[in-house]
Image (cartoon, rainbow, N blue to C red):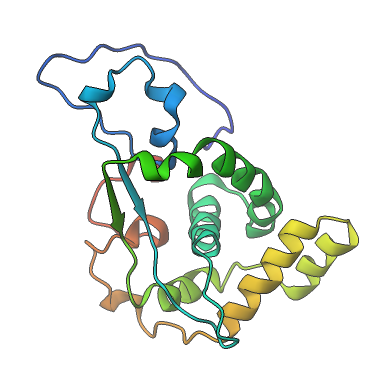
Amino acid sequence: FKLGKRDKYIPFNVKEDEVILIDCLHGLYRKLTSSVPNRNKFKIYIESMNLLRNTNGEFTKWADVRLLKRMIRDSQHRGYPAETTLAHWPYVRKGELKHIIPYIFSTDAVVNSGLPYELSILKATAGKIFPSRRVIERLREEGRLDPYIRGIRVASLMETVAEFPDLSLLPSTSPIREFIGGSSYEIPHNE
C-alpha cells in the first residue's frame, strides 16, 4: 500500500492442518477464495455496527465510521491526506457494494466490533486531519457530489461528538488501536 502498487507475488500452498486467515472485507469476495471448497471455509464478517442516532434522530452510517478509520490509516501509514481518501471513497464504496456487501449474509458469523466510545476516539484522531468545510465545498464545485455529501454529513456528525479526553487511557489491546495507532499487536498493513 505504501508504494501504491504490488511489490511482489509469492505463491504458496496450504498444508492439511493449516488455516488461512484473510483479514479484510475482501475475504468475502468469492473469486478470491474460489479455489477453496466451501466446506473448508468459515466466513466471519466483522463490522463496527453501533446503532447510534445523530442529533437529527437519524442513524449514523457504518460506512461513515469506516471512512474515518480509513482516513486515519491512510494518513498515518500510506501517506495520503484525508481529502484524497474522501475524494476516492465513492470508488471504494462502489467496489464494496458490488463485490462485498452482497456476500455479507452468506457468512457463517457476523460480529459487531463497535465500541460505545468509538466516535469520540475517532474525533480525537481524525478531527486533526479531517478536511475543512472549504475543502469539502470544493468537491461540490467540482461536481463530486458523493464525497461532498458524505463529507458534510461526517463533518456535521463530528461537530456533535465529544472528543475523547486522553488517548493514553485507551488500552493498547483495544481493537480501535488498529486504526489510531498504539496497538500492542503487530499489524502488517500498518507497517
Say which of 4 and 86 sits in front.
Answer: 86
Q: Name above or below for residue 137 compared with residue 47.
A: below
Which residue appears at 49% of the width and 63% of the height? 62
Say which of 115 and 135 sits in front.
Answer: 115
- The reply to whether residue 182 is in sight is no
- The reply to whether residue 32 is in sight is yes
Residue 130: percent from the left, percent from the top?
Answer: 62, 68
Say which of 46 and 75 sits in front.
Answer: 46
Q: Quadrant of the C terminus?
A: top left
Q: How many tags in the picture?
A: 0
Which residue appears at 37% of the width and 14% of the height? 10
Which residue appears at 36% of the width and 77% of the height? 117
Question: Residue 49 occupies which quadrant of the picture?
Answer: bottom left
Report whether 134 appears left or right of 20. Answer: right
Report whether 63 appears left or right of 131. Answer: left
Residue found farthest to the front = 105
Which residue appears at 64% of the width and 80% of the height? 156
Residue 81: percent from the left, percent from the top?
Answer: 64, 55
Question: Residue 150 occupies which quadrant of the picture?
Answer: bottom right
Residue 166: percent from the left, percent from the top?
Answer: 35, 82
Residue 176: percent from the left, percent from the top?
Answer: 34, 62
Report whether 84 appears left or right of 34. Answer: right
Q: Name above or below for residue 84 compared with residue 39.
A: below
